[in-house]
Image: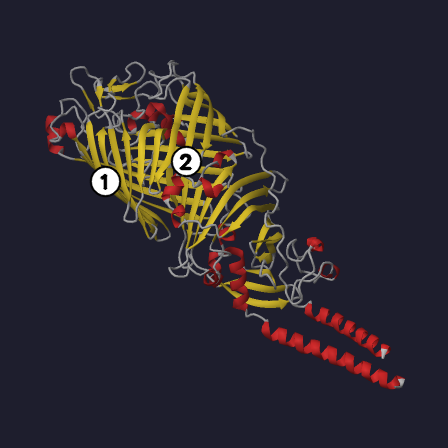
Amino acid sequence: MRFLRSMCAVAAAIGLAAGGVLAQEEPALPPGLEDASPAPEEPALPPGLGGDDEKEEPALPEGLGEEPAQPAEPEEPAKTPSLELPFDLTGFWESRVGARTQRDHYQRDLSIGETRLQLEIQKHWTAAIFNLTADLLYDPVLDERDIRLEEGQGWLDLREANLSFTPASFVDVKVGRQILTWGTGDLIFINDMFPKDWNSFFIGRDEEYLKAPSDALKTSLYSEPANLDIVYTPRFDADRYIDGERLSYWNAMLGRRAGRDAPVRADKPDDWFDDDEVAWRLFKTVRGYELAAYGYYGYWKSPGGTDPISSQAIFPELSGYGASARGTVGNGIGNVEVGYYHSKDDTGGTDPFVRNSEFRFLAGYEQELARDFTGACQYYLELMMDYGDYRRTLPAGMNAADEDRHVLTVRLTKLLMSQNLTMSLFTYYSPSDKDAYLRPNVHYKIDDHWSAEIGGNVFVGDDDHTFFGQFEKNNNVYIGARYGF
Amino acid sequence: MNGTKWFWIMCSAVFMVVCGFAVMSEAQEAGNAAPSVSEIVDNANRIAYYQGKDGRASVLMTITDSQGRTRTREFTILRRDELPPGMAEGAEVGDEYCGDQKFYVYFNRPADVSKMVFMVWKHVDKDDDRWLYLPALDLVKRIAATDERTSFVGSEFFYEDVSGRNPQEDDHELVETTDNYYVLKNTPKDPSLVEFAHYKMWIHRTSFVTVKVEYYDKNGQKYREYDAQEVNTIQEFPTVTKSRMKDLRTDGQTVIEYSNVQYNIGLPDDIFTERYLRRPPVQYLR
């Protein structure tokens, strides 16, 4: 009988072994088996799917291929070592040199020659985020060294210093110095009435410097029917407009181009809480289409008139209303934007020293033309209201603007060398003004920190007084190198 | 009893045990009947891109060129499935979902893309909606998105590898079933839209994790290769935590490592709106 029992045990053992072999067809294979006889083209199982590191795992329950969970948190990949600061610090150091490609009697040959250190500090708390972005720069092109934060002059350009918080789940507030952008245009702005830095744009600084900061309070309200942004700027923030200090411009009073010899003297509204601005945007995304309505109460952002007595440039009152839509059209992205600029100091259009009201329209389309090659075009119209009154009251000898100003833009962007080399060309062309502005640029990312670029700003025009034609003497090429951290 | 009798008893016992196991495994086979090709494809798609109702991961991407020079990208990715109303209630129902999704990608490094946000509303039946937020300009850009097979942030991975390729775009054929894998050959229905003539996938049979993918051109030449290099089970979801894409023509490769992976974190839908492009949802990005 003892023999019977032992034979049964042997049989059972054989059976179990056989069963084990059969059962192994279903679950993950035990370690070693796939290594011993893998199919020639078959990939080895990675760790975690019954690969080598399974040895430490407990035995699998029979008939179940799923192995028990490994430690839920995989090891953190090695991070870039960073300074142990109580806040996030990022930024870059950059040098940029540019020269005019022709003589300009009213300007230096160097269009830009600056070195800049940008420090960006961000601190998160549970209730708020603090942002500080400051540019320390040295630029021998300008004589001025005094810091004028509003104009962005001197060795410090404070770009951001703001606090954002969420006082209620449906409200965001951002207060302080901040960069603000909205609207759908590509380098054309209708309803974005936040300050621009046209000097930076035309001398070949990075495109981020086209936007000048606002000292403002931005409140955003979010709700199901629509969202609302309200930006209150207690003291008017003008554009950093072309004033002759860096770039020569058409001076209508002198009837010629002027530069450092006759810089624009402006009388800017600057009383706190009196000369203020309000901008709002009501917006909503419907099935991927971004719809928005806009309003603005303030002043022309660049000089919109002249005081005939003092002959100073002035910023007449302006209110604006508009709307935009953006979304998928065909194989690309289409956008439409309209705006009405109501020039409150010249409602009838009879004051030749204040800009008339205007209607503005923009339609754009962008599409990927080939792999890593994108093309975009825009049509833009500025239509002067009360044109008859403008012509009738225009002083003799002044160049008359057209009733319609048409502008076409084309942007071509090609990425090469694993997207590290970007070649781009942005072109404005106005058939009505018969002028154009070209912005070629080649940018190369050398590694994760270093990048270099070369580019140009080319203005051409039949007349000396048109929007882009007046800048013909400012044509320039520039090179830059940047180290980011 | 004599020896002959014992011999027969023993043989019968062995026979019964073997038969018993054969019957058992037969039953098991019936229970786990070999899945159809479309089931394999759907499961693999779900395991790769749809586990949980939402999720987050910290991503380290290392791009190495043929000369061994490396570039890195560090970002956090948030994902939320666009469950239809009602479906969101039951997790089990939601697990079968393979439809539209939203992605939010917040870049940390390198410096030139720091704090940028890339957002995608992935649509299964039409082109995705894509946005890019540039913090220095406070600019919300819309990106034209037709070609899904372009490099994602300069890596060897394509947009489609990161967000998923719609299985409906290919014809699938089960060419082999090995002990570990279902081996599929996938041929595009419209070859003009893609650069490959076909691709082969090795899908782990029990977990449906895609372990390897090989892409072939029209000359039958293999030119691109994907490997899952590490799998971790996170909250019961088998998750590829390290993978590699090699471009055999340029000899470049990109390795992606995922860490801090979490599923079902309860991401609200409005994270994927303009509000949070302009104001990153810090609590989900850490």
**Chain designation of label 1:** A
Q: Where residue A322 is drawn, which disc sits there?
A: 1
Farthest-out residue, right: B2
Q: Amino acid at mark 1?
A: Gly
Relative placement, left or right, of B46 versus A295 is: right
Colour setting: secondary structure
* Location of the N terminus of chain A (image quadrant): bottom right
Report the residue at 38% width, 33% height from top. A164
Q: Nearer the viewer, residue A32 or A94?
A: A32
Cα separation between marks 2 and 1: 34 Å
Q: How far across and down, in percent of the image, does residue B140 sit?
A: 37, 40
User: Can you say whether A428 is above or below A202 in the image?
Assistant: below
Relative placement, left or right, of A202 versus A434 is: right
Q: Where residue A127 is drawn, which disc sits there?
A: 2
Identify the secondary structure beneath mark 1: strand
Q: Residue A65 is drawn in which quadrant? A: bottom right
Report the residue at 56% width, 34% height from top. A447
